[in-house]
């Protein structure tokens, strides 16, 4: 068995959504200008970058235009994988979307991208939304994710979400989280990883690591102690949208 794993899928979806809207639908930006912006790592093109970050459809927001791109993109990936796998009888090549914990090191090898990402910045972990863009709530993120061809991603495609601990207190909070997980399963969800903490708690843990040695967060396909992560990974956890229920 050899997994064929796609990486930076959310970045790619958001980048293609930006190209389609700005270059082909609105015709407000030329492809040459976008390419020039990337060549300059967005320096001198911050207004264009902010337009892409704030006014273009994003994956994980239940936005039909972005989700359509995601389905087509993964459809091609799955079809091409199966086509080439046919040359190797006796070997399975299940498709997957994932990064494990390597999304920071992978990003160092990837140049600036049309979704507004800078050269060398981390790519999106697993099949999660890009950092800070899933602004329509966890239900919208799950609906976008479950609209993808998850049944054809037998190698796994984790969706990582972070929830506010203050919104999940007591039995009522546990019931709300359990209900969300049931919805995820009912919609055909593939893999869901959940971190329950608060931004301020994570910031305190960075300042006072000895007092938070037991604080754990989801990291790729496993749970990691927050204080053992490097500073870049810690700040990326803080940058994730903190959902309430």
Image (spheres, rainbow, N blue to C red):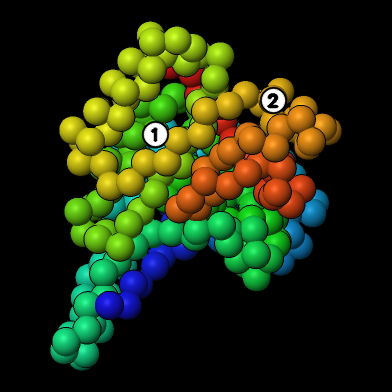
58 to 245, vertically: above or below: below
**Which mark is nearer the camera, 1 or 2?**
2
Per the rendering, the mark at residue 97 is none
At 70% from the left and 37% from the top, the residue drawn is 213
| Residue 85 placement, left or right of 191 | left
Quarter of the image with the N terminus is bottom left
Measure the alpha-carbon separation of dots 1 and 2: 24 Å
At which x and y percent is residue 175? 33, 15
Question: Label 1 belongs to which residue?
Answer: 141
Q: Residue tagged by mark 2?
A: 201
Name which quarter of the figure residue 235 lies in: top right
The quadrant of the rendering that contains the C terminus is top left
Above-or-below relation of 168 to 242: above
Considering depth in this image, is 86 or 203 the residue closer to the camera?
203
Q: Nearer the viewer, residue 76 or 156?
A: 156
Q: Crowding near pointer 2: few (<14 within 10 Å), some, many (20+)?
A: some
């Amino acid at each position: 068995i050899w997994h064929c794993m796609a990486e930076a899928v959310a970045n790619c979806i958001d980048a293609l959504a930006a190209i389609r809207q700005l270059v082909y639908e609105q015709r407000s930006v030329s492809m040459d200008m976008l390419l020039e912006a990337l060549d300059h790592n967005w320096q001198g093109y911050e207004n264009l970058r902010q337009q892409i970050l704030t006014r273009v459809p994003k994956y994980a927001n239940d936005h039909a235009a972005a989700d359509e791109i995601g389905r087509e993109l993964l459809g091609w990936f799955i079809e091409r994988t199966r086509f080439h796998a046919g040359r190797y009888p006796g070997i399975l090549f299940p498709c997957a979307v994932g990064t494990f914990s390597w999304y920071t090191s992978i990003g160092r090898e990837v140049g600036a991208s049309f979704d507004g990402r800078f050269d060398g910045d981390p790519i999106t972990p697993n099949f999660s939304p890009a950092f800070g863009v899933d602004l329509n709530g966890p239900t919208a993120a799950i609906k976008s994710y479950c609209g993808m061809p998850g049944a054809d991603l037998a190698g796994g495609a984790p969706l990582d979400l972070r929830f506010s601990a203050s919104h999940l207190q007591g039995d009522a909070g546990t019931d709300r989280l359990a209900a969300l997980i049931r919805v995820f399963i009912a919609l055909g969800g593939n893999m869901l990883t959940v971190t329950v903490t608060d931004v301020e708690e994570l910031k305190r843990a960075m300042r006072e690591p000895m007092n938070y040695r037991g604080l754990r967060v989801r990291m790729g396909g496993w749970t990691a102690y927050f204080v053992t992560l490097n500073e870049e990974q810690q700040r990326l956890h803080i940058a994730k949208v903190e959902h309430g229920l």
